Image (cartoon, rainbow, N blue to C red):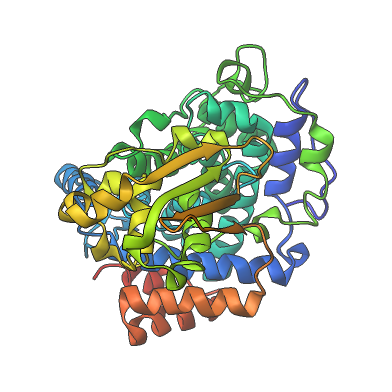
Amino acid sequence: MTDSLTPAFAIKGAPLTEAIVTFAEMPATAIPNSARHVMRLSLIDWCAVALAGRDEPVSFITREMIEAEAGAPVASLVGSTRKVPARAAALVNGATSHALDYDDTHFDHIGHPSVAIIPAALALAEMTGAGGAAFLDAALIGVEASVRIGTWLGREHYQHGFHQTATAGAFGAAVAAGRLAGLDGPTMAQALGIVATRASGLKSQFGTMGKPYHAGMAAANGVEAVLLAKAGFVSRPDGLECEQGFGPTHAGAALALGPILEGLGTEFRFERVQHKFHACCHGTHAMLEALAALRDNVKLDDIESIAVTTHPRWLRVCHILSPVTGLEAKFSYRLTAAMVLRQVDTGALASFTDALAADPVLVSLRDRVVVETDETLADTATHVRLRLRSGVTIEQAFDLDAPLPVEVREAKIRAKAASLLGKDRAEAFWMAICGFGAGRVEKFASMLAG
C-alpha cells in the first residue's frame, strides 16, 4: 500500500480510474473515525435488513441455486450454515440484503451502496482471512468509490434507465474486494476494466425481484473481476472512461472531474448516506415524513385531495399508480401516502402485502392522491398539500438532506435493528462490529447464518 494519495502510476486518458485506484490503497491510519462510525452504522443496518429478508423469494431462489451448485466452501451465506465460493456468496448476500428495499441510499448518485459493496468485502475477507478492521475499511473505501463513480456517471445515467446500485456499485465492490485481495495499482485497474464490461442493471426491473438481484449482481461482478485480475486476466485498464467505455456507452454525463475528486482521501462523502426508516423506496420517504407531520390534525373522511410535489425524476422510480402487490406498493407514491395518512406503520415489513394493496379504504384514499413535479426541488425534498372538504388547505415540506445528528442517527438505526432482529441479537451484532480488530471475520460471518 502507498502511504499517500499521490498516484503510483499513470493510466493514459483515465484520470478517474487512476484516482480511484490510488484511493483504494489509502492507508488505514488516514481514514477518519467519523467515516468509520457511519460505516459501522451501515453495517449493523445491513445485517438487520439482510437477516430480515432471508426468506424473501429472491433470497430463497438465489440461495437454493448457489447451494445446489456447491463449490469451494470459503464464504458465508445469510440464512444458511453452508459456505460457498466467494463470488456466489456475494451474489446471494447482495440480493438478500436488498430484498426488502430497506437499506441505505446515497443521493449524490441515487444508489444503494452498502448492499452492493458489503457482500463483496465480506466474501473476500473470509476468503483471504482478513481481520474485521480491514474488512470494515475495505467496505468503507468501496462505498466511497461507488459514490464518486456514480456521481461522475451523473443523473443522466440514472434517468436513462440504469440502476446505479448495479453499475456504480459493481465498481465499488471491485475496489473493496481488490483492497482485501491485496491487488497492486495496475492489477486493480485491470479489475475495474473487467467490471466496465460486466456491470449492468436496469430500472425497468423496479417492483420485481430484478431490483434486489441488481445488488447481488454488483457484488458478484466485483468479486469476479478481482479474482480474474489477480489471476492475470487482461482487460482495458481505462475501460471506465475510454472511447466506447462504460461511461460513454451508458449515458454517463462525463462531468468535470475536479468537483468529483475534490477531497478524495480526506473527505468521505459516504458520511452523508441516508438510512431508511420506512420499508419502501427511498424516493417516497420525504413525502412520508411530511404527511406524518400533518396526519394527526385531519380525519381521513375530511380529505378531498392530496397533492404531492416531487422532482420529476422520481416518476420513473416510485410512481406505480395502482399497485397490486406488496412489492409494487413499495414503489407507489399514491399508496404509501394513503398508508401513512391512515397510520399504517410504513416502517413495518408486515405492512407491505398484496392484501394491503387491495384494501378498499386505502384504495379510496390512494385515488385522491395527485403527484405533481417541480424541477427546482431537490430530489431529497418534497412538498405536500392536503385540501379538505371544508375548503381549507394545509401544507408541509420536508427534505431528507436536513442534517441528522450522529447520535440521533445511531439511536434510530439501532432501534430499527432491534425491531428486525430482536433487542439482544441486535446488540450482539453491534458489539461485534464495534469490537472489530485484527481477528478474522469468521465469528461475525457465522452470526448471519440464522
Q: Is residue 120 visible?
A: no
Q: Is residue 307 above or below residue 160?
A: below
Considering every residue shown, the one lying at the far top of the view is 243
Q: Position of residue 157 (x, y in %)?
A: 57, 27
**Which residue is nearer to you in this view: 415 or 212?**
415
- Name the outermost residue toward the front: 390
- In the displayed orientation, state which residue is furthest to the bottom: 424
Estimate the x, y position of residue 279 in percent, counting from the top left: 37, 59
**88 lies above or below 31:** above
Residue 408 drawn above or below residue 289: below
| Residue 190 versus residue 412 in the image, above or below | above
In this view of the protein, can residue 122 be seen by the observer?
yes
Frontmost residue, 348 versus 437: 348
Is 278 left or right of 149, judged from the image as shown?
left
- Between 271 and 133, the residue placed more toward the observer is 271
In the figure, is residue 180 to the left or right of 303? right
